[in-house]
Image (spheres, rainbow, N blue to C red):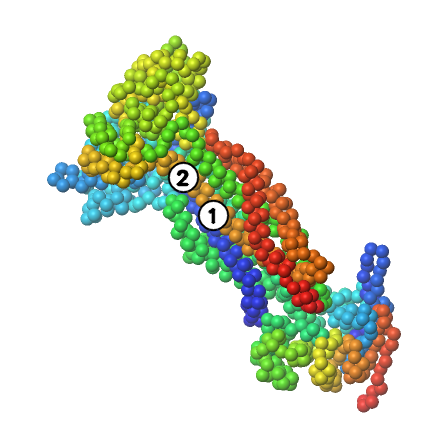
Amino acid sequence: MIKLKNVDKYVDSRFQRTFILKGIDLEVQQGEFVTIMGPSGAGKSSIMNIIGMLDEPSQGEYYFFDEPVHKMKERKKSEMHKHYIGFIFQAYHLIDELTVYENIETPLLYKGVKGSERKSMVAEILDRFQMVAKKDLFPEQLSGGQQQLVGVARAIIGQPKLLLADEPTGNLHSEQGEEIMDIFKKLNEEGMTIIQVTHSEKNAEYGNRTIRLVDGAVVSDERKEQVKS
Amino acid sequence: MLRNYLITTLRSLFRNRINAIINVVGLSMGIACAIVLFLLANYESGFNKFEENYDRIYRFINSSPGQGGDMDYTPGVAVPFPTVVKEDFPEFEKVVLTRDHYQEKMFTINASSESPVYHELQDERIVFTENDYFNIFSVEWLEGNRANALANQNGIVLSKSIAKRFFPAGDALGKVLVFNKMYELQVTGVVGDPPSNTDMPFEIFISIGVFADELKEARWNSVSSNDQCYILLAKGDKISKYEDRLPDFVDKHFEEEDEEVYELQPMSELHFSENHDNYSYSTTSENEILVMILIAVFLLLTACINFVNLSTAIAIKRSKEVGVRKVLGGTRWQLVFQFLAESFGLILISVILALGLAEALIIYINPFLEVALDIELLSLEFMGSLLAGVLTITLLAGFYPALVLSGFKPALALKGKITTRNSGGMSLRKGLVVFQIFISQVFIIGTIVTLAQLKFIREIDLGFNSEAIVNIRIPEEDSSKKNTLKNEIARLSGVENISLSFSAPTSGSVAISNFKVEDMEEDFYTSMKYIDDDYIPLYDMELLAGKNISESDTLNEVVVNEKLLRYIGHQGTYEEVIGKQINLGGRWVPIVGVVKDFNTTSLRNDIMVVALFSRASTYRTASIKVNLNSFAATNKEIKRIWKSLYPEYEYDYKFYDDRLHEFYEGEQQMATIFSFFSTIAIVVGCLGLFGLSSFMINQRTKEIGVRKTLGASVSSIVGMFSMSFLKLIGLAFVFAVPVIGFAMDEWLQSFEYRVELAPQLFAAGLFATILIASVTVGFKSIKAATANPVKSLRDE
């Protein structure tokens, strides 16, 4: 599904080139739940941005379902965002001016889903996350955990193939965090590919593969035994 | 999707409502003023365009060398002129003589009955002309026979409203009335009222045949600007064919030394003619129209700049939304569309508000400038230009912010790493603010210079004293009545002095004649003042030599001004000239006095050569020096005396000081309009400055916090912000000075007496801008500087 080939990301200043990522080779299969870990400045967010097509590698090749992302135009990338990729952020990033309902609905609008279908899809997901009562509230009226639930709902309503989560529980209490991670696990079991960045070993346990980055390079890549297969 | 945009827009506007209000208020003020100015420019440039024969009507205009090498210009022709034109240019389809009548307009209805009704008209305009007038100019014909209404020498055609006033029963046609107690006329037609944008604003048309006897005797060398000659070119004919023949025509009918030049001026230039006046007494130079359009564009630009500045400033607040929308799959063009639609919405609201404002403005402007502006909301033309305007402003004001917003990189935007510095265009935004301040300064300095010039001409020494002098007119020629009037008024206790004359020292009319000086060959020209012996003392004019004229009804001695002596080349003392004979109008009379130079016309012109002498038959003005404390009672007495002598006429008096101010009514209007639009430009500019400064300060709260923890004082922080704005003001000033300096110098050139464009005037403008800007920016920066740094630093 995802194939990074010798990807570099660097910043040029006047006298030197600073590498953020160097020589990354990475393959992710459909259905995996990957955790990326590493100290601050290791390049976790950069690799997420590249996989999520929000940023481009300075060098190297990136294939998404065998399509070369490094050659895609912006319009095509928008298409990928609409149909294949969902994002979850540490700071939730809900649109402040929109209610819970409207926030969840927005990706469907960009996808061009028809009115009645849209309604039922939003209703279904509200129901699933038990947020029906809160659908008319604005983000600032919700707790952090609730906001992140909305963030998850918004990310998955378009039924993406890939879910990218950049420290999704970083701003949450452990209890709220667990709730989110349980949802991730369930989604993964339903077949969704998930890549998350986290500092928490406990959260990493939910996944089935852990990649550790140090100074822009992969230092380890462990797969959990597939206990039940 | 649209609903989603709309919701976001409305909620985000509400969240940033201060900015939104600033945006809408500023924009609508700018647009309202621009609408009014465009309407005004359109109105002025649309003068006479309703004439069906607009491009076939021409009039003869004349230029000839006058006193002291200047050219004299007149649209007037000698009375026999049109007749000769008809003979020499048979190709012209129509040729008419028109004579504007500006003196008494007394009409008597039922003159022969026991109770005649008198109507004395004031501002209504009367023209004496021939029947072909109606074949040249578009006059809406309501009653009577258009083909021969003025064919008889006693025909009179009335406008609808005049007819209604004279004959309320509505049976004007065929009725007989008497004009100025002399001419018996019969109503042969009723026509529509003239439109407001015409230079032929006549409401009464009288057959020029009433002057048949006078016309027969009329001479070639007596020209009045009231007599004009209009022609109608045949369809398809070209004026260029005749232009070459005009010099020959002049040679044939004028003497060689006259150096007269006649030209044919098209109707399209009538309203914009610089040297030749027209019958509406209002010409607008093309420059003035250009200035109106420029001011309108400037105001619009200021408002648009506000919009751009505030929108890009808010953009940073909305960068997160942009990031999220992009991540969710929104394309850049979808976002551009969203933000453009937002701008469009705001601009549409502003335009609707602006229409209301403009409508209100027009209510004040129409009577003030004596124009008839009208917002024809439903006309295709207006709607079209309005829509085009809205779209232009949307693109102008909305496109840049939309591009900036939609161009944010989502990875950066979501990390909150978009700041004023990397949101792009900080220097562009500063440039726009500089441009805005530049516009404000141009307006401020322009206003200051205009007001200074007005004050200057109001306070200048005219060479006579105009204080506490009331002028009343004398309607009839009868000399014994005039003398009775003078003697009776002189006896009133509140009256210090009274003088009869043709006109006051400074007046709108000038009579010119040639004269000879004893022992000298050349012909000289002088303007003349017909005065009695009380005139010079009443107006407190200074006699430099000799004495005042003595009481007399006719010319037998003359007082001259200094300029006349310079003009004839007199070298010695003024005393030496006393007793010298000069020949005025064929009669040798002695110079008995020399009076100090005084202004005979408005201060746009230099002092003229003047000869003052008696001629009782021409006296039309009584000047009364009154005691101001008891004026109300005195005025009642004067009115009683006046009414007893001239019962049919309206009593009307005017303080001479007020009359003098009227000479500069145009300038006064200009000053008022200038100050008004300056105020708008400044207010709009301030709104923008306020919005921008508060935004910049918000962006720098953290910096302020850090500086304060490092020990910066409140005053040093306020000083830091003030400096950054002072720099912008200084830069704008550097650009504004040459621009407005040049423009105002051009304007001042139209005055013979003008203030100097002193550096203080510009400095005052700079000072005013700094003051206004400091108040605008200072409030916010003091608030920011005194805030507790703990709060601003806890954000992170």
- Neighbour tally class for label 1: few under 14, some 14-19, many 20 plus, Cα within 10 Å: some
Q: Is residue B424 left or right of residue B25?
A: right
Tell me the number on the disc at residue B676.
1
- The answer to which quarter of the image holds residue B337 is bottom right
Which secondary structure lies at badge 2?
A: helix
Q: Is residue B404 left or right of residue B130?
A: right
Is residue B545 or residue B212 the one in the foreground?
B545
Is residue B672 or residue A78 the one in the foreground?
B672
The amino acid sitting under disc 1 is: Phe
Residue B490, percent across and down? 24, 30
Q: Is the residue B588 above or below the residue B143 in the image? A: above
Q: Residue at x 78, y 84 (%)?
A: A206
What is the CA distance from the residue labelled 2 to the residue labelled 1? 16 Å
Q: Is residue B369 left or right of residue B351?
A: left
- The answer to which quarter of the image holds residue B237 is top left
Residue B212, percent across and down? 24, 28
Which residue position holds label 2?
B665
Q: Residue at x 62, y 78 (%)?
A: A142
- Neighbour tally class for label 2: few under 14, some 14-19, many 20 plus, Cα within 10 Å: few
Residue B95, percent across and down? 34, 32
The N terminus of chain B, quarter of image: bottom right
**Residue B272 appears in the figure:** yes
The amino acid sitting under disc 2 is: Glu
Q: In which chain is the residue bearing label 1?
A: B
Q: Is the residue B48 above or below the residue A82 in the image? A: above
